[in-house]
Image (spheres, coloured by chain):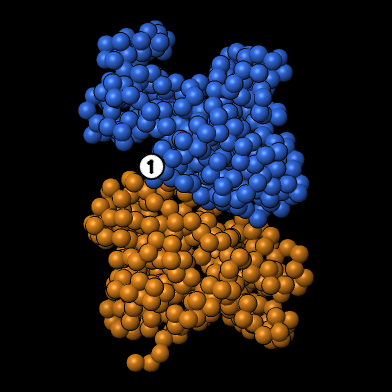
Chain colours: A blue, B orange
């Protein structure tokens, strides 16, 4: 078998780089959740991570390994989501410029948040493009060439994957061995890192991925044995609207993830309300995927020790308010 | 000087009783909050406590000290708020009946939550009364006599006060000495326990209370040197709609609390949104009092180590959704 893109040592090294930089996020428990599921559930709260999502771990781990030349040039990323903010913040912390290429119709709050993270770092900017008439790849390639910047993709990159794995590592270090680990799946950065970390730190653990029903490309890919591409799915889980897994992440998923389950948007809404009402946590729709599978009985694990990664909490406040009232 | 109702030893003993029963709630930090205030701020998240508020600490500490006879009779409480749920849950955990006397026009969600906490405990019930035609004191006195139940008031009780003090004790044990501790003020149970704990664990700390502007009875009481009674104040901070401090809590406030500040409902709304957007935390209006004073510049503490107790997170979801959208 060819080697996977990352090893447990890579995740350990990432954890060292993140020490004192990333939050060691709390692991929370809920009697109600345990009662309803019959399991012993440990929630790793990456919604309480810096910039509000696990993405900070991978972005920082990647940028921290730039060469001096790469640092001078800075980093470029395409994203309108959590990856944008993770790169912007990590770049500023490491004192390098960042250019984030975002659609010009991105929500104003996301543009503002990204610019806020760039503040005080000369050479940093948000570059807007028209997604109907412009090719963002071409924009990125031109900027990278002109300014000597390095592109960091949102998931298909070994340093990003290794960084994401540190959340599962911390979880198991804190609570001990797990029987089952539930992780949301978009492009596969989080679950691939988590699977490598978990199988090493808790041998025998079962790692299960959860996708939105409308965007089950990874489930299809596992069934077919090759990466399946789908149209951009319609789901409130905007962090899992990816069209396909990565060339580096998919082999890890194939080898270390038992299976992929799916949940509906209605499941996600109910789970978001559960977290607000019973646990006082704001969790974004994508961040609810793993917990929704458990709460809605899609995954059953009575008597088992179950870890769930709540991946993020970045959701527009007005929209979130409407979700709670619906 | 006459002795105060509680000592640091009482709080230490309460902490022992709560060990493994109450959550040791996380202390969270926010770079944004530190930047905006110039302080180093530690947030003790009692919104993540069992049943969603610090009230569990005091209720459990009181009920755990019942005599065998008192246990057999059970506990009675008047409350439509967090005290009701704290008593209902604590009683069930200790295997005793609870009767919670609530207005018949209480929100359905609060009635349901209280009954859920009573589930499985024979003899427990919610007794409704008409607040316009019936005298709840008379109802309580009759039930207490008929059933041999013991009334536990929401704040003016030494065991309740000592239990509430354990949150501040845990905070200081975890983060070390503080320069300033900000605590919300209703009837004074939380701030009196906190003040005794903090002055012992962090000598020289300044303890400041925060009330809603519309309900500043404790501020008035401190100015007058005696307990001032006010009409039920109009404020979204429903946990601080008390009309007066207690006979046991006020002497502690007089001696150990430097001053009482006030914030407006608009401050509370802005702070609630800050917690949802930047920290992914659901904090009820009353729970925002201390942080609002800091965020809005009512209390300034540049360069100081500041503890803030986020007292609770119980807010009706539909109403909370509307607060976020407003």
- Give me the chain letter of mark 1: A
Q: Find residue B162 and report its horizontal and vertical position in percent.
A: 49, 77
Image: B31 above or below B10: above
Q: Which residue is mark 1?
A: A21
* Image quarter hosting the N terminus of chain B: bottom left
Q: Quadrant of residue B147?
A: bottom right
Position of B134 relative to A286 (above/below)? below
Foreground: A8 or A216? A8
Residue placed at 34% from the left, 66% from the top?
Answer: B177
- In the displayed structure, does residue A68 sit left or right of residue B185? left
Where does residue B180 sit, x and y in percent of width and height? 31, 66
Q: How many marks?
A: 1
The secondary structure type at the circle numbered 1 is loop
Residue occupying image coordinates x 29% and y 15%: A148
From the image, which quarter does the C terminus of chain B lie in? Answer: top left
Instruction: Examine the rendered structure and indicate whether residue B263 appears above or below residue A280.
Output: below
Q: Residue at x 42, y 74 (%)?
A: B197
Residue B275 location (% of width, % of height): 42, 48
- Across and down, in percent, residue A265 comes to 62, 31
For the view shown, which residue lies furthest in the bottom direction? B2
- Is residue A55 visible in the rendered image? The answer is no
* Residue B81 location, quadrant: bottom right
Say if A1 sits above or below A300 in the image: above
Badge 1 crowding class, 10 Å Cα cut-off, few under 14, some 14 to 19, many 20 or more, is some
Residue at 32% x, 30% y is: A91
Q: Nearer the viewer, residue B146 or B93?
A: B93
Q: Is residue B147 visible?
A: yes
């Amino acid at each position: 078998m060819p080697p996977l893109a990352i090893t447990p040592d890579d995740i350990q090294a990432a954890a060292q780089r993140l020490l004192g930089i990333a939050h060691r996020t709390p692991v929370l428990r809920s009697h109600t959740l345990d009662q309803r599921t019959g399991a012993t559930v440990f929630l790793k709260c990456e919604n309480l991570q810096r910039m509000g999502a696990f993405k900070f771990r991978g972005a920082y781990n990647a940028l921290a390994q730039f060469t001096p030349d790469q640092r001078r040039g800075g980093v470029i990323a395409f994203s309108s989501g959590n990856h944008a903010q993770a790169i912007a913040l990590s770049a500023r912390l490491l004192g390098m410029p960042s250019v984030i290429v975002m659609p010009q119709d991105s929500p104003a709050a996301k543009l503002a948040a990204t610019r806020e993270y760039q503040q005080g770092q000369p050479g940093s900017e948000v570059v807007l493009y028209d997604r109907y008439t412009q090719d963002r790849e071409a924009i990125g390639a031109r900027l990278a060439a002109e300014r000597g910047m390095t592109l960091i993709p949102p998931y298909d990159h070994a340093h990003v994957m290794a960084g994401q794995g540190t959340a599962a590592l911390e979880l198991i270090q804190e609570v001990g061995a797990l029987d089952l680990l539930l992780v949301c799946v978009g492009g596969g950065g989080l679950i691939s890192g988590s699977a490598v970390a978990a199988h090493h730190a808790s041998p025998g653990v079962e790692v299960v991925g959860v996708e939105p029903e409308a965007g089950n490309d990874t489930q299809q890919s596992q069934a077919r044995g090759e990466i399946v591409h789908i149209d951009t799915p319609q789901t409130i889980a905007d962090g899992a609207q990816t069209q396909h897994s990565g060339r580096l992440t998919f082999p890890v998923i194939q080898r270390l993830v038992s299976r992929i389950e799916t949940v509906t948007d209605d499941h996600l809404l109910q789970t978001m309300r559960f977290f607000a009402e019973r646990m006082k946590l704001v969790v974004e729709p994508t961040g609810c995927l793993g917990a929704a599978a458990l709460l809605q009985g899609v995954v059953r694990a009575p008597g088992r020790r179950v870890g769930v990664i709540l991946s993020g909490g970045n959701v527009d406040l007005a929209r979130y308010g409407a979700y709670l009232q619906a």
